[in-house]
Image: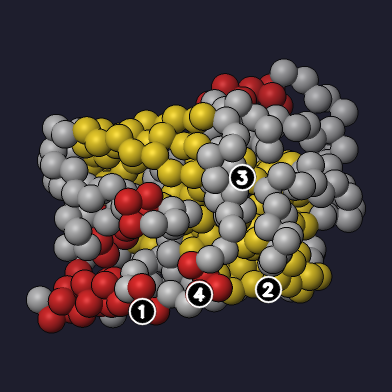
Amino acid sequence: MAGLVAAVLIAGLIFSPFLMGKSQANQAFAQGTGKQKHITLIASEKEVQVAPDNPLHPGGIKYNAMVWNDTIPGPVVSIDQGDNLTVTLINKGKLVHSMDFHSGYGTNKANSGPVKPGETKTWSLQGEIPGFFFYHCSADALNGIWEHIANGMYGGMVVHPTTEEKAKEFYVNYGEIYGNNIPAILSGIKQNATASFDIGKFLNSANDLELTNGMAFKYVPAIGSVAKIPLNANASIFKVKPGELTRWYIVNAGPNHFLAFHFIGSMLTVRDGSAGPGLGNRYGMIDKNDDTWTIPPGSGSVIEATFPQAGLYVGVSHSLADVVKGGAFAVLAVDNATDTDHPPGTMVPPKGSESVSGPAEMQNNTAMMAAGNQSQPSVNITVTK
C-alpha cells in the first residue's frame, strides 16, 4: 500500500503545473493539421507461449498473459506529425484495464482512465511531437500497473516527423517475464503448468525471460559455432539490403531493467524527440555512430543503422544475462531483401501512409521467401560473436 501511495504521489507531482517550466508549457507543437486516423485496441487475458522448445527450456514455456489485440506486444501505432488519432479501447477481459500513451500531451490525451470488463471507451490525441513513444496498460489507475506491463500489455507509437528520410523500418519490443512454475535455465525440467506473474521475482528484478516481440529467442535460430545450441527451429529473420538505411523502433517495456541496445557489426545513430525551437518538424540527433545505447524501462528509441556488407548481424541487449534469457534478434543483409519482407508484426507504416498499423499480409516474410528469391546467397544464420 505504501508503494501504491508513493506511485500516486509521484504521478501527481509529474503532472503538477508547478513542475512545468514556461519553456515546456509554451512550446508550439503541430496540432490537428493532418489526417484523421483510428485504431481499436482490445484488452484481454490469454495463455501465450513465451519461449520455444529448446535445451534452455525443454518443451517451451506458456504464460498467463495480458494482451492488446491478442498479442505481446500490442500493434505498432503509426501516424504523422499533425495527424489526429482516435483510439477505441474495448475491454474483453475479466480485469480492469486502461491505456497510457506516452505520446499524449495532456492528461486527457495520454490516459484513458479505468475501463471495466465489457466496457468501451473512445478518445482522441494528436501527433504533436515527433518520435517513438511507449504505450501500456495502467491497470486500475496505477493499481496493478506493474503486473499488467510485466504480463505483456505494452507497445509503441510512432509519430513521423514531416522531414523524415525514407528507410526500411522495423518494430521491436523488449520485455521481461517474471513467472512461477518456470524451471531454471538448463535444468532439463519441463514446465508442468502454465506460469503466472510472480510478485516476489518482480520485486527482486529476477526475470525468467527477456522477450523480443513476445517470445524469448523469437528471431534467433541458434547460437554457437563449435558448440552449437539450437534455440528456435521456427525463428523468423530480419532481412535488409547491404548499405541501405534502416530505422528500428525499439521499445524497452521493462518493467524493471534498463536495455543496453547494441548491433553486432554496425553502429547506431539515435534520433529521438524533436530537434529544438524552430526545428520541431524533424527528429533530434541524440547520438551518432555509437556502439551501444541505453533505453530506460518504459521508453522507446528511434535507432538508425546501416549494415555495410552481406552477412549476419545481431541486435542484442548487452546486459548479457538478458541475452541468455532471450534478448537478441538476427538481421540478415542480403541483396534480394525487399521493402515488405518483414517478420510478422514488425512492419511500420511509413510517413504519409494511410495505414495506422501494419497489415499481417504485408508482414509475412515466410511467404515472400517461399515465392522465389532463388538467387539468395548461402549465409550461415547461426548467431555467433
Say whether marks 4 and 1 touch (CB < 8 Å).
Answer: no
Q: Which residue is mark 4?
A: 22
Does residue 206 appear anywhere in the picture? no
**Residue that appears at 65% across and 61% down:** 274
Q: Which residue is mark 3?
A: 81
Q: What is the spatial separation of the Cα atoms under label 4 and label 1, in whole angstroms?
A: 10 Å
Residue neighbourhood size for the residue with mark 1, other residues' Cα within 10 Å, grouped as few (<14), some (14–19), many (≥20): few
Of residues 275 and 331, the one drawn nearer to the viewer in this rendering: 275
Of residues 77 and 55, the one drawn nearer to the viewer in this rendering: 77
Q: What is the spatial separation of the Cα atoms under label 4 and label 3, in whole angstroms?
A: 23 Å
- The disc at residue 18 is 1
The quadrant in which residue 18 appears is bottom left
Q: Which residue is mark 2?
A: 292
Does residue 367 appear anywhere in the picture? yes
- The disc at residue 337 is none
Where, quadrant-wise, is the C terminus in this rendering?
A: bottom right
Looking at the picture, which amino acid does disc 2 mark?
A: Thr
